[in-house]
Image (cartoon, coloured by chain):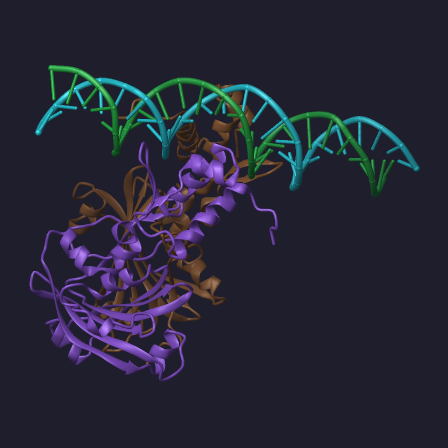
Chain colours: A purple, B brown, C cyan, D green
DNA sequence: TCGTGTAGGTTGTATATACAGGCTAGACCA
DNA sequence: TGGTCTAGCCTGTATATACAACCTACACGA
């Protein structure tokens, strides 16, 4: 254990703690370099390095002349881009619409309980939505949300705000894990997505964490003939994604 | 155009240029901070920032007391990890084997010519391999390689070294773009992969750049019932995460 | 009232300096 | 010969200082 960590790292941890605890929310102003010089008794260059690295890592955004501000997760995170299909569709200049098929309280069982790290029978909300791009169905969102995480989930109108937008408003999502599979769709899925008989579906299975615990588990079904996931790599290591004209999401990274 | 870029950025560009031009190869020693102070007439802190950021970005690795060295692309790039299925299989402790179905010179047409940004009829090598994990077929690699990029491609024994390992030995691959799709396999693919009649395939379509030009285009077909792509995201913004690799489905079968 | 100008805070960069700690080759000694 | 020690290079961090550019609120004047 590094008992003696560098002072710039202490500063970074100090800021990160304020962000992840909720004391500092997106768009909030972060102490300026000079304020850190005062309060933390460090030189300005040390404060500068801490804030600059937090900027590089995406925690904050800095504007010369104005200050340093907590990043707006909804606005800039690629994680969110992956999650919110409404934004993806809007980015392509198309119209998003969605239909809520189910919005109910259930007791978690089997795979869902396992994925969310909860006991069998724990309360979860079950959401089933069909998302459409220009009226053409493009995704079936089959989602389970830990009830204790978002108690007022049943009161939301998810035809107006997507579940992922709602969930990120409840608390910042801090980690996500996903798997992509190819499957033949069930009859129900095929029906929702208006798919042909000889068509495969692309399924994204995703789990999202907040504050160290998984809070939602979802299966996103897409018609294989109309949907693809795209990714773009630039070495070394880091992946960036760009929007394309086709229906797209992005996956992977390093 | 930013005529005046910061001096630390000039230093970074200077080093990156030496790396991508091949003048500095993986594991080669990079000029030390003090050497840059001398040769570039900057302060040590400026040289330090340049080298430290190159380290953060993965271009180089620094060892206190020894120096700064060019990263070994093959050893650490996730781009490579994603590409070389043999390594992925080995990482899971399993045995990789592959069978070369086709290894021939062709004239590029249609989609291939378009993907590689070349004229119709330009020489390309066509490779078709079946990769197996513990003797179970897992991937059909259908790859086109720009002939001028790797002239001795037909002489290679790809049952011993995978095409991607060979290609990265010819020149570092600097960029990759991929799309993931779900499809019903053709009869040939289904046969190669030993798939059932009611099974979808997961297809990764990838294009890789070297020195600013696309040099290979490939379609990687996987059996949908046995394989998935996984990814792991950690916010904020920078999806700097675990490798995106092909993983075998185990307990997730239903 | 409305526009202009500016003072002062903020980030961005660059330098000089200092000390700590890691690593290695070569000097030195037994 | 073989082991030890150290000088000298390297990175890692921290500070003090300086100047530029940017942005905003507010005072000022037409």
Q: Position of residue D2 (x, y in %)?
A: 84, 42
Q: Nearer the viewer, residue C21 or A72?
A: A72
| Left or right relative to A238: residue A75 | left
The quadrant where residue A68 appears: top left
Whether residue B249 is situated above or below residue B38 in the rendered picture: below
Q: Residue at x 57, y 46 (%)?
A: A5
Q: Position of residue B65 (x, y in %)?
A: 62, 36
Q: Residue at x 23, y 78 (%)?
A: B197
| Left or right relative to B82: residue B180 | left
Residue B80 in view, yes or no: yes
Residue B60 in view, yes or no: no
Whether residue B99 is situated above or below residue D17 in the rendered picture: below
Q: Position of residue B26 (x, y in %)?
A: 49, 39
Q: Residue at x 15, y 56 (%)?
A: A89
Whether residue C26 is situated above or below residue A29 in the rendered picture: above
Q: Nearer the viewer, residue A158 or B170?
A: A158
């Amino acid at each position: 254990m590094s008992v003696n960590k560098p002072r710039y790292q202490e500063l970074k941890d100090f800021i990160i703690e304020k962000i992840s605890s909720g004391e500092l929310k997106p768009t909030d102003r972060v102490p300026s370099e000079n304020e850190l010089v005062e309060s933390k008794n460090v030189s300005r260059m040390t404060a500068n390095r801490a804030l600059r690295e937090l900027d590089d890592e995406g925690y904050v955004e800095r504007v010369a002349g104005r200050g340093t501000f907590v990043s707006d997760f909804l606005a800039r995170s690629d994680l969110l881009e992956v999650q919110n299909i409404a934004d993806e569709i809007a980015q392509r200049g198309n119209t998003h619409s969605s239909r809520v098929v189910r919005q109910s309280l259930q007791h978690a069982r089997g795979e869902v309980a396992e994925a969310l790290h909860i006991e069998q029978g724990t309360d979860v909300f079950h959401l089933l939505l069909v998302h459409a791009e220009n009226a053409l169905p493009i995704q079936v969102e089959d989602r389970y949300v830990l009830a204790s995480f978002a108690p007022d989930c049943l009161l939301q109108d998810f035809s107006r705000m997507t579940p992922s937008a709602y969930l990120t408003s409840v608390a910042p999502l801090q980690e996500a894990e996903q798997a992509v599979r190819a499957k033949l769709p069930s009859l129900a899925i095929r029906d929702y997505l208006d798919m042909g008989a000889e068509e495969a579906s692309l399924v994204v299975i995703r789990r999202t964490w907040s504050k160290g615990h998984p809070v939602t588990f979802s299966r996103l079904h897409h018609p294989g003939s109309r949907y693809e996931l795209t990714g773009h790599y630039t070495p070394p290591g880091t992946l960036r994604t760009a929007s394309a004209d086709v229906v797209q999401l992005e996956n992977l990274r390093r």
